[in-house]
Image: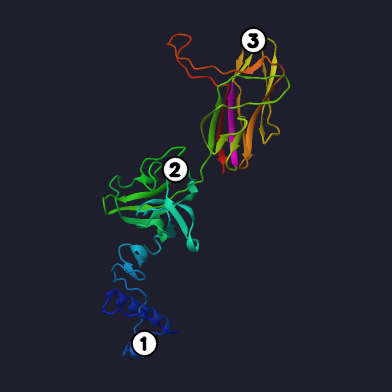
Amino acid sequence: MRLKLPPAPPSYNAAYDDQRNRLIEAFAANTYQKGDDVGIYQPAKLIVSDTNFITTDTHSPAEGSVSWNELDGTLDLGMDNGVIQQIGLDTYARVENMTGATITKGSVVGFVGVGANNTLRVAKFLADGASNSLYMLGVMAHDLPDSGQVGYCQIWGHIKNLNTSAFAVGDILYASPSTAGAFTKTKPTAPNNVIPVAAVLKVGTTDGEIFIRPTIEQQDYYGVFSDTATKTAAAAYTPYAITMNTTDFAKGFSRGTPTSRIVAAASGLYNFQFSSQVSSGSSNAKKLWIWPRINDVDVPNSNSEITVSGSGTVLVPAWNWVLSLNAGDYFEIMWAVDDTNVQLPAVAATTGATGTASFARPAVPSIILTVTQVQQ
């Protein structure tokens, strides 16, 4: 076993001497026994320490060196860009910036591609729902200039010397849905991403401190659709797909072509809940059937039969189906009647005075469909 020391600096350097001494001590501990004669390294007998690190050495380490952090009970490792890693307490990802601008220390960043040497390429993360939460990565540990410069994104541990004056100790910080790379203490709501990233440990304009612990869950998809037009059946015993002319709000689902198709952007297990208006136009008993289809195929054991009678009678059937869809699959609600005097009516909103038949109330859609995700 040979000991190779780093090149000596041109003048005295305390950090170099500390590093050299630690290397000699580590080498000796693996080469000699206590009491051995070590020749030129020490004229007397060697006394080997039981540790390879001097716990009284608490200087801030230069790049490539270590020192003992007495406060946190661990080693500080000096890395490039002025980052000091607390070994065992901090975790980083090596990242690249090609955004066209410096990403400042404390910015929330997300994974946007792969750079040279398979380095993660990052950009400031905006939690407005446009990007999947799974692409959020962590917080920049230092300013990272543009043009492919490589640095460190912290994904666990303490970040110090930040401006946390807008927050209070104990605040949970989320990725902001309005400002890319920023934090917010206000929990976002759908359709924005809800990603708890850090907790505030110290408040200050320049000496603030946070603890990074991103909690990233896969996003749930959903949708609410309706139709404001009355539905009629042109012929008895003929299935018709119920169209939707309104998307109230949705994420991961959209109306297709024709608009009876509700298209899933991602695979998953979904709950489809509907309610509809059903009215009778004559006194005789009439039957109505309602069931779902996926990709133009009837779902087995999913049909329901309703009987409605009496002219002007209105029923509100409402139930649900829990179905598994793949990405790109489309869902439809089918209906059929044995008498064309059955329809799915829509009623317009009214704006009249309270106490009158036209008192102000919302419209009644012919159908409302709500989709929620049950499992990824």
Neighbours of disc 2 within 10 Å: few (<14), some (14-19), many (20+): many
Q: Amino acid at mark 2?
A: Val
Residue of label 3: 311
Residue 131 seen from this side: yes
In the structure shown, which secondary structural element does the residue marked by tag 1 occupy? loop
Label 1 to label 3, Cα distance in Å?
Answer: 109 Å
Between discs 1 and 3, the one toward the N terminus: 1
Can you tell which of label 1 and label 2 is closer to the viewer?
2
Amino acid under label 1?
A: Gly
- Image: 332 above or below 268: above
Judge whether residue 87 is colored magenta. Answer: no
- In percent of the image, x 56 and y 39: which residue is there? 374
Q: Which residue is mark 2?
A: 194
User: Are the two marked residues, 3 and 2, in contact with CB atoms closer than 8 angstroms?
Assistant: no
- Range drawn in magenta: 268-276
Residue bearing mark 1 = 35
